[in-house]
Image (tube, grey):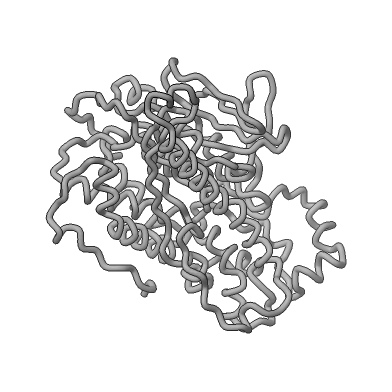
Amino acid sequence: MPFAAPTDPPRTDTSPVGLVLTGGGARAAYQVGVLQAIGRLRRSAGERSRFNPFQIITGTSAGAINAAALACGADDFEATVRMIGRAWSGLGPGQVYRADALSVVRSDAPWARLLSAGWLIARWRRSGLRSLLDNTPLRQVLAQMVPLQRLDELMARGCLDALAVTASSYGSGEHVTFFQAGPQQQPWVRSKRMAVPVRITHDHLLASSAIPFVFPATPLDMGSHVEYFGDGSMRQSAPLSAAIHLGARRVLAIGSGRVQEPQARLAPNALSGYPSLAQIAGHTLSSIFLDSLTADVERVRRINATLSLIPLEERHRTTLRHVELLLIAPSQRVDLIAARHAHALPPAVRSLLGEPSMPRAAEELKGAALASYLLFEKAFTRELIALGRSDAMAQRDEIRRFFGWKRGQSARDVVKAPGPAA
């Protein structure tokens, strides 16, 4: 693991920088490319520190895994980003989930017919299945990629202020932010959401990334009792709030789609017809994973605009605080990228993407949104990483201003926009 002890002194920044990594299953590979570009821009600006430029790191779902891995290497940012990049670039579905459970739907009959006949539900009950996919292999990946035992030391050395991951309780309905930080950091409570100080474990990461129905819920100790948790993107109305509560006054958020995605130009026959279950599932997951960030970004910008109307000498009378926000999100439609790679999914998973009688191209297009969350496959993740690098470099001036870095040599900033993977 590339975690050599640095010679840098502890940070003395007075304005902590926060990083927010959102959910999205396999879409989270996009975040790696953005982080790679940030490392490149920092080098070209002449910055010599090896420390992570983010003192406060928060993540949800697959973004929680990236966040935790990044936090565990906070003393060597670029080496850690390279390690995360290698992990995503070499990823295969078998490292994240087993598709054995989907044998219950291996049939030529469409899902809708099986459900209407009650066959699938009866088979599901008899088998005792708790999810479509078994994510047991992911635990081994986390053991290698996320050495959480380093967090206490890194915080004591001033390399990191806080790490937070979020999950949603199926029992209480609460949206819970689990955070590890110094003793001075107090938890907070808001309507249907709360923060709990803990020593973050791999179970917290599995809980945060447990896509509903797809992966099983994870039990977590809540002190006096145990609750089962699923994906932290569920009921997450304010994805930026954890970083702000933990003290960040400058926040960089990396989305996984929809915020800046252009409208799709699809042929009418791709839009017509009754939606498949895969389409409905993809639409539902997109609503869970993508919409809340857009709303929260708008909320922060409205608050900033409101504060700008209040005289400086009067602002102490309000609890509102100005937050400098930089958002980087995909410039291309991730579901259309996924459609080009859907054939690489395991056969059992492909059976979810549409009617077997449909032509392959139409089938993959209609199931593309769902596929984009399950495509833990290297050709897809590498294309998303390249897109993340390209999108971040397109915002290089904004990134430099955000961090206060000087402009580097323009030749180093050139990056080709990604195209379809070979």
Residue 99 image offset from top left, x and y in percent: 61, 58
Q: Is residue 141 visible?
A: no
Q: Give the residue at the far top of this rendering.
A: 183
Residue 410 image offset from top left, x and y in percent: 15, 59
Quadrant where the N terminus lies? top left
- What residue is at 72 percent from the left and 65 percent from the top? 105
Return the residue nearer the eye: 347 or 53: 53
- What residue is at 24 percent from the left and 47 percent from the top? 400
Quadrant where the C terminus lies? bottom left
- What residue is at 61 percent from the left and 80 percent from the top? 270
Residue 154 image offset from top left, x and y in percent: 33, 26
Relative to 133, 94 lies left or right: left
Residue 315 image offset from top left, x and y in percent: 43, 26
- Up the image or down, 395 lies above or below 275; here it is above
Q: Quadrant of residue 208?
A: top right
Q: Quadrant of residue 412?
A: bottom left
- Up the image or down, 422 lies above or below 225; here it is below
- Up the image or down, 390 lies above or below 67; here it is below
